[in-house]
């Protein structure tokens, strides 16, 4: 009986070691090929073409084919290039409940993109209020143009699953599609009363970037198509 138990324990150790070896042997996830007409903004391995604005560079990194926002305190990770009219796509997932982030668009290099440019809100709508004990305003929900245009209700994936985002800026029109559901279809000139507080609404081009706010969030398949 003692011999059988010893053999069984040895088998468990061998299997566990084998599983750990398999996990370590898994290669990084390769970025998907962008659709026709799109260019990838992330090479899958480094942050070449990006720069940190308003925060600590160590909050940002790459891992397994994704851009990783490790924590809060990192400000924004912005593209080095500016864009005027475009269709932007990416996927993101939260590490745990209560996450908050955003996509800055047409933003200058300095200043808060939510005001100096525009911020498309990304947040764990379901988990935010229970984790952080604070209620969201309409314009703070996923897909909203922050503090400008509230979004329709988002259909978020479970924590740890990938959500999709599509943002189209074409002249004065901005549309936001999240998990294949259109949440915002806005004409910026309809918000002239907000121009003083949000001068970014009048900008015609700028950088695109991701916000570091609190917990880890991963981004992948970050693509853009410039529009004429």
Image: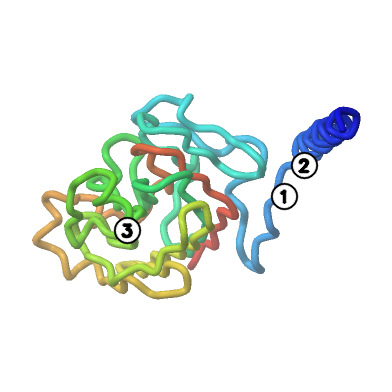
In the foreground, 71 or 76: 71
User: Quick one: SS at disc 2?
Assistant: loop
Q: Quadrant of residue 171?
A: bottom left
Of mark 1 and mark 3, the one earlier in the sequence is 1
**Residue shown at 20%/46% (left/top)?**
133
Q: Quadrant of residue 1?
A: top right
Residue mark closest to the camera, 3 vs 2: 3
* Tag 1 residue: 30
**Residue shown at 34%/30% (left/top)?**
54
* Residue 105 x, y percent position in the rendering: 37, 52
User: Quick one: SS at disc 3?
Assistant: helix
- The correct choice, above or below, for 79 with respect to 226 in the image is above
Residue reaching furthest to the left: 193
CA distance for labels 2 and 1: 8 Å
Answer yes or no: do the residues labelled 1 and 3 have beta carbons within 8 Å?
Answer: no
Q: Quadrant of residue 18?
A: top right
**Residue shown at 89%/32% (left/top)?**
7
* Residue 67 x, y percent position in the rendering: 55, 42
Q: Quick check: 18 left or right of 226?
A: right
Of mark 3 and mark 2, the one earlier in the sequence is 2
Residue mark closest to the camera, 2 vs 1: 2
**Residue shown at 15%/55% (left/top)?**
195
Q: Which numbered circle lies on residue 27? A: 2
Q: Quick check: 34 left or right of 73?
A: right
Residue reaching furthest to the front: 1
- How many C-alpha atoms fall within 10 Å of the one at disc 1: few (<14), some, or many (≥20)? some
* Residue 120 x, y percent position in the rendering: 33, 56
Q: Which numbered circle lies on residue 212? A: none
In the foreground, 227 or 60: 60
């Amino acid at each position: 009986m003692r011999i059988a138990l010893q053999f069984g324990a040895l088998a468990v150790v061998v299997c566990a070691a084998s599983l750990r070896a398999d996990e370590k042997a898994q290669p990084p996830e390769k970025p998907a090929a962008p659709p026709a007409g799109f260019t990838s903004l992330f090479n899958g391995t480094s942050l070449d073409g990006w720069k940190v604005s308003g925060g600590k560079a160590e909050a940002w990194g790459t891992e397994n084919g994704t851009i990783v926002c490790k924590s809060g305190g990192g400000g924004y990770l912005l593209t080095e290039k500016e864009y005027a009219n475009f269709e932007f796509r990416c996927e993101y997932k939260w590490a745990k409940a209560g996450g908050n982030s955003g996509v800055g668009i047409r933003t200058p290099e300095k200043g808060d993109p939510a005001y100096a440019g525009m911020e498309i809100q990304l947040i764990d709508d379901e988990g935010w209020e229970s984790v952080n004990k604070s209620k969201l305003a309409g314009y703070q929900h996923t897909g909203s143009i922050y503090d400008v245009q509230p979004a329709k209700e988002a259909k978020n994936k479970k924590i740890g699953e990938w959500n999709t985002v599509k943002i189209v800026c074409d002249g004065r029109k901005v549309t936001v599609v999240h998990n294949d559901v259109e949440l915002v279809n806005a004409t910026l000139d309809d918000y002239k009363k907000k121009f003083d507080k949000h001068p970014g609404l009048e900008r015609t081009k700028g950088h695109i970037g991701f916000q570091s706010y609190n917990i880890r969030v991963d981004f992948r398949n970050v693509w853009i198509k410039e529009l004429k």
